[in-house]
Amino acid sequence: MFQKFVRNLFFRKNENPAVPLRFTAAAEEAIRKHLDQRKESVFRIVVDRTEGGTDVKIGYDRNRNSDPLYEYPIPLEIDPEDEVSLEGARIDWEAATGEFRIYPDVDLDVEYQPIRNRFRIDTNRRLFDDLDRRRFQAENGYPEWMPKAVDPSKIGTLEIRGSVWILFLNGAYRSNYSDILILEKEIADSVLDFFSAFPKRIK
């Protein structure tokens, strides 16, 4: 039987690049205690994506059907695609509520560069499998997966390379300082929400 994780989000700067899914000591202990009573079982994680959002669910499976890409402190059954999506996240156990919690731990730094009229975003997440530069233009239509704050009426071009996003404002959009701050917050919140929903890695 599955149990939904309680989703939480931390905004933290100056962290290392994304790492494999991590388990806190409390989470490890809770999982091991359960598995000690069921020697044949493994800890299972499934990322369930629907139009209404993303749920990370757990369960205990009797058989391991795949080998994880990384090594973990507990026996883990997880689809490789889900495993990549959960890179950088952290699983904790809250004894008071008897719930596992997942922290996306998305690290995001947004800087407005006025001379070039653009935003630069550095994050500890990657959307694409490789480090090639991708360029998207408003006039051609943005992909459906694009964070909602990438508004084609304001953002003319988006470039993504690895974990760096560059958003060029439309030439006609040169607003005052307060409007830039509002737009900066909208973009930051939108990209944080986007990566906190554990999107699939795009090939």
Image (cartoon, helix red, strand yellow):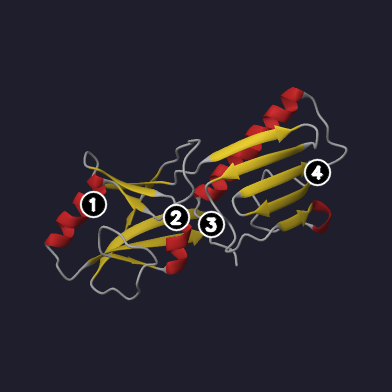
- Secondary structure type for disc 4: loop
Crowdedness near tag 1: few (<14), some (14–19) or many (≥20) residues, C-alpha within 10 Å: some
Tell me the distance, in whole angstroms, between the alpha carbons under discs 4 and 1. 48 Å
19 relative to 97, above or below: below
- In terms of depth relative to the viewer, which is nearer, 143 or 137? 137
Tell me the distance, in whole angstroms, between the alpha carbons under discs 3 and 2. 11 Å
Quadrant where the image shows the C terminus: bottom right
Does label 2 or label 4 sit earlier along the sequence? 2
Residue at 43% across / 52% down in the picture? 19
Crowdedness near tag 2: few (<14), some (14–19) or many (≥20) residues, C-alpha within 10 Å: many
Quadrant where the image shows the N terminus: bottom left
Residue at 21% across / 42% down in the picture? 95
Which amino acid type is marked by label 4? Ser
- Secondary structure type for disc 2: loop
Tell me the distance, in whole angstroms, between the alpha carbons under discs 3 and 4. 25 Å
From the viewer's perspective, tell me whether residue 184 is left or right of residue 126: right
Which amino acid type is marked by label 2? Glu
Residue identifier under label 3: 199
- In terms of depth relative to the viewer, which is nearer, 115 or 186? 115
From the viewer's perspective, tell me whether residue 9 is left or right of residue 42: right
From the viewer's perspective, tell me whether residue 9 is left or right of residue 125: left
For marks 3 and 2, give the one nearer the viewer: 2
- In terms of depth relative to the viewer, which is nearer, 155 or 98? 155
Which amino acid type is marked by label 3? Pro
Tell me if I can see residue 4 in this picture.
yes
Does label 4 or label 1 sit earlier along the sequence? 1
Residue identifier under label 4: 153
Residue at 72% across / 51% down in the picture? 159
Residue identifier under label 2: 87
